[in-house]
Amino acid sequence: MRRRLLTVVSIAAMLVLASCSAAPESGVTNPATSSSNATDSPSEPAPSTAESPLPTSEVTIPSMPSLDATTGLPATSSPSTTSPSSTPTSPQTSSLPTAATSTTASSPTSSSATVASPAPSTTPLANATAQNVFDSMSLEQRIGQLIMIGTPAGSASSGAISAIGTYHVGSVILTGRSHVSATATRAITDKLQAATGTSTNGAKLIVAVDQEGGKVQVLQGPGFDRMPTALYQGTHYSLDQLRAHADSWGGELAAAGINLNLAPVMDTVSQSFAPKNAPVGYFDREYGYTANDVAMRATAFANGMRDAGLAVSIKHFPGLGRVTGNTDTTSGVTDTVTTRQSDSVGAFGVGINSGAPVVMMSTAVYSKIDPGVPAAFSSTIIQGMLRGDLGFSGVVISDSLDGAAQVERWSQGERAVKFVAAGGDIVLTTSSTAVAPMYAALLARANKDTAFRGQVDAAALRVLELKGSLGLLG
């Protein structure tokens, strides 16, 4: 039975996608009460490494539209109203691609555009360097590599700097919205990097940001282009154009000291259900309304970011497209539709096959997969589906675990332990005050449970391998 589930990766056996745009609207619970997840919540209003092969043909990037400050969409058009030069195609009827081939798909402005499979995200040299750094780390330092702490995007907080030194924290996320320049942002990330040293055994920080576009664009100051919503990107640009845009946007981030973009969203939301889908569809964070469109266009975005030298995280596995509730503000958010064989899960397989080095987990519950257990705490979903069915060997990161209503019944320390025990690698907390209890719980469990200690070691090595691929290990 489980071997048959590998057909999720051999996506051609899953579907003829002309019919996949109508995700059932029944079986979803908990109406939304707010916007989205803490790490990537839309603002109201929003002022709004290995290299991948470059596009095989010359790409002309269309000029960026002027964006409406409230909607995050182009002021003179919307995804449903396009100019003659950028008319979207009808939903594609081809199967989702397999890992073994370079893929092509019809696009808004060309009949065939290449989505090339990038090179592997790590090299033997990067892995050897990671192993050397890992071998000389203490258990405490390895646990620090499993934590990502938040700091306001416009400053390097004393809490974050202290946590790097005290708890050996290995990753930072810039949170909120910032209107400082790219140059000023670089000064902030440099200050954060300077806090490493002996505390992290010389390993530099992963510095992450949510830079999707539209309402979810953390860095908005001079030097950062305004990015339209993912839905606009997916319906107005060809695959080559989208990849080239993402390359440009990624270059801005890299120049500012960012090395991981927690994007793209790879959740599939049907067009009819999108307005009711608080985490994604309500804010046009999806790249289209079918699994095939999402897979092709989100992968083009991811590959463009990787062309610019950034790592990306596809999210929120196994998908938030069939819930109404917001896991930040609502508990018990449950998807009663998605299965291990769902087309929407297959879309993540395309991103993985194309080389995405990081996958972010949802905290929703999936009753047809692992009833009652949030995905981030489910070994069935992380180990069975993500690593088993889809063959993902990279870094698994949580969505924010510090203040989400969905996981409030567990203490902060328990959340960190449950995530790592399920197979996760980086525990994301936007709050500096959550680091101490999370770190303490991970250390205590590792000291008394040899199996868990093994999981900590495996997770730390995966994080260090990612850092090696990004040139963060010296």
Image (cartoon, rainbow, N blue to C red):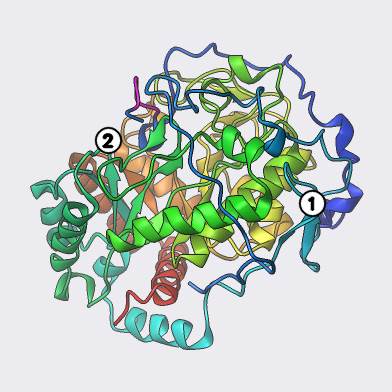
Residue 228 included in the magenta stretch of the image: no
Q: Residues within 10 Å of mark 2 (few under 14, many from 20)?
A: many
In the picture of the structure, the residue carrying the numbered disc 1 is 105
Residue at the image position 73 percent from the left and 55 percent from the top: 389
Residue 315 shows in the view: yes
98 to 70, vertically: above or below: below
* Relative image position of residue 437 (x, y in whole percent): 23, 45
* Relative image position of residue 69 (x, y in whole percent): 37, 23
* Relative image position of residue 108 (x, y in whole percent): 73, 41
Which three-letter amino acid code belongs to the residue tagged 2?
Arg
Counting labels gives 2
Q: Nearer the viewer, mark 1 or mark 2?
A: 1
Q: Nearer the viewer, residue 112 or 434?
A: 112
244 to 210, vertically: above or below: below
Q: Nearer the viewer, residue 73 or 35?
A: 73
Which three-letter amino acid code belongs to the residue tagged 1?
Ala
Q: Nearer the viewer, residue 132 or 138?
A: 132
Residue at the image position 19 percent from the left and 65 percent from the top: 193
* Relative image position of residue 294 (x, y in whole percent): 68, 41
What secondary structure prevails in the magenta region? loop
Residue at the image position 16 percent from the left and 51 percent from the top: 160
In the current view of this chain or complex, which residue is farthest to the front? 84
In the picture of the structure, the residue carrying the numbered disc 2 is 177
Q: Earlier in the sequence, mark 1 or mark 2?
A: 1
Q: Residues within 10 Å of mark 1 (few under 14, many from 20)?
A: many
SS class, disc 1: strand
The residues colored magenta run: 42-46
What separation in Å lies between label 1 and label 2 (alpha carbons)? Answer: 35 Å
251 left or right of 77 in image = left
Residue at the image position 33 percent from the left and 40 percent from the top: 218
